[in-house]
Image (tube, grey):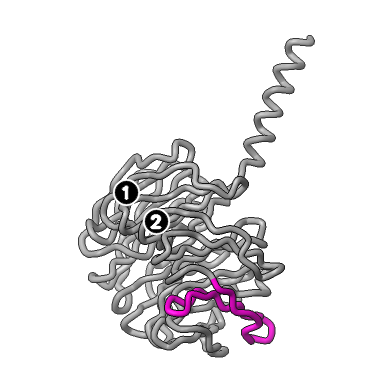
Amino acid sequence: MPFKFLAVLAIASLATLSAHAAPYAYITNQLDNSVSVIDTAKQQVIATVPVPGKPAGVAVNPHRQQVYISTPETGGFVVIDSQKQAAVKTVKLAGASLGIAVDRDGKRIFVADWYENSVSLFNADTLDKTGVVTVGKSPSGMVVSPDNRWLYVANRVDDSVSQIDLQKLTIRNTTKVGAHPFGLAVDAKGKRLYTANVEGNDVTVLDASRMKRIASVKVGARPYAVSLAMNDTLLFVTNQDDGTVSVIDTASLNVVSTITVGDKPEGISTHPDDLTVYVANWFDNNVSVIDAKTLAVTHTLVTGEGSRAFGSFISP
């Protein structure tokens, strides 16, 4: 009996440790051809995974314990095993893959092809290509609605966002936004969609269901990507040419703070705690960590050359 009890206790303890394992942040270092893996509990890089092909985009699939990294130079994407922190598979595509996303149940992978003006769909189990949807020119950022019904795609050169019906695999709507939209974010209720418009120096706010424009908010120079925090009350926007992050109050749609980070901030994601925001700084080869309560940088983590991390790069 004592032995059995201790065995059960040990298994329970391991399960508890596993359940409370810290999320990891996956930072693509485009000029290093690598991905830095950050342990968000320790706030340090614990692994560097070689990924050829100028890695850029990131999508995390917790259902399969995998991370997908787009490789614009070679086309397609690389699959990283998030338990081993190692690349295990390469999937090839024509053109130049950039934006990458996963649906909410982890069954489908979406890859935006910058030159082919399309989004390719892949089965996450087999990694087979299952379909293609033609969108606008130079598709980049993508995000899936919380109910798994829509895929939103930023068409940079067309100054628009396409809304794809994930059941029919057809475009339901395409809406004009600001100049050269790139990064996207949707709130937890699926009500609002936000686009960072690189050439417009602003963020467009859309009704996510009807795809109607609600507002335009001026931010810093060349906004690249966006991420929500604090129960969707704050929107964080990376401004490439300012080396800053603009913070927008989503109720008033006013900029309430501007935070200095590293040089050429690009990718941005919020930790599952909803309080910590990670920013990849392209020219400084590092990541700034922001406290969403105090709106201050708390850590700066050295990663690799050309840290970009475009997409949702933190595991749940």
Q: CA distance from mark 1 to mark 2?
A: 9 Å
Q: Where is mark 2, residue-wise?
A: 28
Tag 1 residue: 51
Residue 109 seen by the camera: yes
User: Residue 106, position in %: x, y?
Assistant: 48, 51
Q: Residue at x 41, y 67 (%)?
A: 168
Do the residues under discs 1 and 2 have CB atoms within 8 angstroms? yes
Image position, residue 82 (x, y; %): 47, 42
x then y, percent, for residue 181: 41, 80
- Magenta residues? 237-260
Is disc 1 surrounded by few (<14), some (14 to 19) or many (20+) residues within 10 Å? many
Determine the residue located farthest toward the right in the rendered image. Answer: 2
| 27 relative position to 276: left or right | left
Q: Quadrant of residue 88?
A: top left
Mark closer to the chain start, 1 or 2: 2
Question: Does residue 106 sit above or below 274 in this rendering?
Answer: above
Q: Dot 2 lies on which element?
A: strand
| Three-letter code, disc 2 | Thr
Nearer the observer, 165 or 92: 92
Crowding near pointer 2: few (<14 within 10 Å), some, many (20+)? many
Q: Is residue 248 magenta?
A: yes
Residue 220 placement, left or right of 272: left
Label 1 secondary element: loop
Question: What type is the residue that disc 1 sits on?
Answer: Val
Q: Is residue 20 left or right of residue 198?
A: right
Q: Quadrant of residue 98?
A: bottom left
Residue 109 is situated, as x and y percent measured from the top left of the image, at 40, 56
Query: In this rendering, would 183 be left or right of 117?
Result: right
User: What residue is shown at x 41% (from left), y 73% (from top)?
Assistant: 153
Q: Residue at x 36, y 71 (%)?
A: 140
Residue 173 seen from this side: no
